[in-house]
């Protein structure tokens, strides 16, 4: 019977342990925290959006980095398999808007408890308050781990599932980077992703708390195709922008994001010409009013004031004196408001980490290191990340399951 040690009791580590046990191994799961799945408790605002019912093509489209590397893992355990697995563990699920899957109870703790119960039923040795400080090697193979206490644990195979570097208070402080680098493996630097964006422009600060619905945010690319362009909701904050569109855009920005431009379209349903026609109609109807009265019909008052500020037009400007240039400027500052990235909010606030162990160093069919036999990786510690909607947890579950199965069955 293979002796498997799994480092990290998050989504990926628990799933790795479960699949290693189901594949007949003897498994020890090591978690530095006082409980398993600390990050799972805060996912989906405490409700845990554990996967998404999206079909294969749509699902792959929501993976930002290295989707091709994940084909085998997702083939082996896809979203339907994850749902069946949890239902089988007695956790009833429900599907919400956007195909997001949650436990019916709305309690993230049900997901962790379901896995925890099954691990104990299958005889997993779970050791809490146990931090691994080094991987041990024998004749070029992973052969066990050294704990912070100095204790050594021998193993036939070792799975590193120590997570990314976001929300480090949950225990994911990036130990996987150090373990991989010590093994001579290549890593990509940790960068915040799915995180709010600070802007150089200060006008959003003044409108902090304002939610913009049905707008389009675009991150232009070096070529014609933008890096990112989506319709949806965005929030203005005291440092810049947040909300679904800003979080997603952050994942697509260049690694060096400072100075990158974003374009906000407040009226994506109208072309420039249609907006111009609308302005002309409003001007006719309100010819004796001030321009702010027209703008109030196009945007919330505070935002309308800012738009006029960007145009350099006084809100008291009489409508019957608006020039063609002024109209063009209004259209530009409604359809193409330029925002400049000052910086991304840090890892402490990021939902996921971009970067991690290079996928070039890992066999996608097994999750084993190509350099070090017996050493496996799973979850966010790998250079993979996806958009919000349950995709990141699914990737943790899928890579965990594949690593667990293979670590349990490796020919020594
Ligand atoms: C606020 C927030 C909300 C989110 N909501 C969602 C959501 O609704 N849906 C979704 O799909 N994704 C969501 N995510 C992302 C998702 O939670 C992660 O992608 C996923 O949990 C990663 O799982 P993991 O097992 O790879 O890492 P983690 O969950 O970070 O687990 C790693 C574990 O390893 C342990 N560890 C680290 N180093 C050591 C060591 N040296 N020795 C022993 N143990 C160690 C850590 O304590 C930790 O428990 C959210 C993230 C955040 C921060």
Image: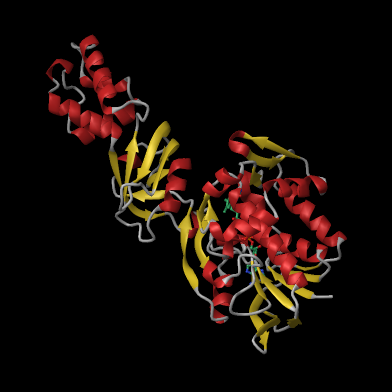
* Image quadrant where one finds the N terminus: bottom right
Residue 373 or residue 104, whichever sits in front: 373
The quarter of the displayed image where residue 377 is located: bottom right
Residue 43 or residue 325, whichever sits in front: 325
Residue 404 or residue 170, whichever sits in front: 404
Is there any visible trace of residue 38 in the rendered image? no
Q: In this view, does 32 lie to the left or right of 327?
A: right
Q: In this view, does 148 lie to the left or right of 98?
A: right
Tell me what residue is drawn at x 25 percent, y 24 percent.
Answer: 273
The quarter of the displayed image where residue 15 is located: bottom right
Is there any visible trace of residue 257 in the rendered image? yes
Vertical side of 405 occupied by 178: above or below? below
Vertical side of 44 occupied by 374: above or below? below
Q: Which colour scheme is used?
A: secondary structure
Q: Is residue 174 left or right of residue 123?
A: left
Residue 221, given in percent of the width and then of the height, sits at 33, 50
Vertical side of 64 occupied by 389: above or below? above
Residue 67, given in percent of the width and then of the height, sits at 54, 56
Q: Which residue is outermost to the bottom?
A: 139
Residue 385, given in percent of the width and then of the height, sits at 53, 56
Residue 343, given in percent of the width and then of the height, sits at 36, 55
Tell me what residue is drawn at x 25 percent, y 14 percent.
Answer: 281
Tell me what residue is drawn at x 16 percent, y 18 percent.
Answer: 318
* Image quadrant where one finds the C terminus: bottom right
Ligand 1 is located in which of the four quadrants? Answer: bottom right
Looking at the rendered structure, the number of numbered marks drawn on it comes to 0
């Amino acid at each position: 019977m293979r002796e498997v040690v799994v480092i990290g009791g998050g989504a990926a580590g628990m799933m790795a342990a479960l699949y290693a046990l189901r594949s007949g191994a003897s498994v020890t799961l090591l978690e530095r925290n006082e409980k398993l799945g600390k990050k799972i408790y805060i996912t989906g605002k405490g409700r845990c959006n554990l996967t998404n019912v999206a079909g294969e093509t749509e699902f792959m489209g929501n993976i930002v980095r290295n989707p091709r590397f994940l084909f085998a893992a997702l083939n082996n355990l896809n979203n339907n398999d994850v749902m069946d697995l949890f239902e089988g563990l007695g956790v009833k699920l429900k599907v919400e808007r956007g195909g997001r899957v949650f436990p019916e109870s709305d309690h993230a703790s049900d997901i962790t408890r379901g896995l925890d119960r099954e691990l104990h039923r299958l005889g997993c040795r779970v050791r809490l308050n146990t931090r691994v400080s080094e991987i041990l090697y024998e004749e070029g193979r992973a052969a066990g781990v050294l704990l912070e206490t100095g204790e050594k644990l021998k193993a036939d195979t070792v799975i590193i599932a120590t997570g990314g570097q976001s929300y480090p208070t949950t225990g994911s402080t990036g130990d996987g980077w150090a373990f991989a680098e010590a093994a001579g493996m290549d890593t990509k630097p940790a960068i915040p992703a799915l995180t709010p964006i600070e802007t150089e422009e200060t006008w959003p600060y003044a409108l902090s708390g304002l939610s913009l619905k049905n707008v389009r945010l675009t991150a232009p690319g070096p070529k014609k195709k933008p890096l990112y362009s989506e319709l949806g909701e965005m929030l203005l904050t005291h440092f810049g922008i947040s909300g679904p569109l800003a979080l997603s855009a952050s994942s697509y920005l260049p690694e060096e994001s400072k100075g990158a431009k974003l374009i906000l379209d407040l009226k994506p349903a109208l072309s420039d010409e249609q907006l111009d026609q609308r302005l002309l109609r409003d001007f006719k109807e309100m010819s004796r009013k001030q321009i702010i009265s027209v703008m109030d019909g196009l945007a919330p008052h505070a935002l309308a004031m800012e738009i006029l500020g960007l145009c350099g037009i006084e809100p008291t400007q009489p409508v019957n004196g608006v020039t063609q240039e002024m109209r063009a400027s209004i259209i530009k500052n409604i359809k193409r408001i330029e925002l400049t990235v000052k910086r991304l909010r840090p890892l402490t606030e990021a939902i996921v980490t971009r970067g991690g162990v290079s996928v070039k160093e890992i066999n996608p069919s097994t999750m084993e290191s190509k350099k070090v036999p017996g050493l496996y990786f799973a979850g966010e510690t790998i250079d993979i990340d996806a958009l919000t909607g349950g995709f990141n947890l699914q990737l943790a579950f899928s890579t965990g399951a594949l690593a667990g199965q293979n670590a349990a069955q490796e020919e020594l």
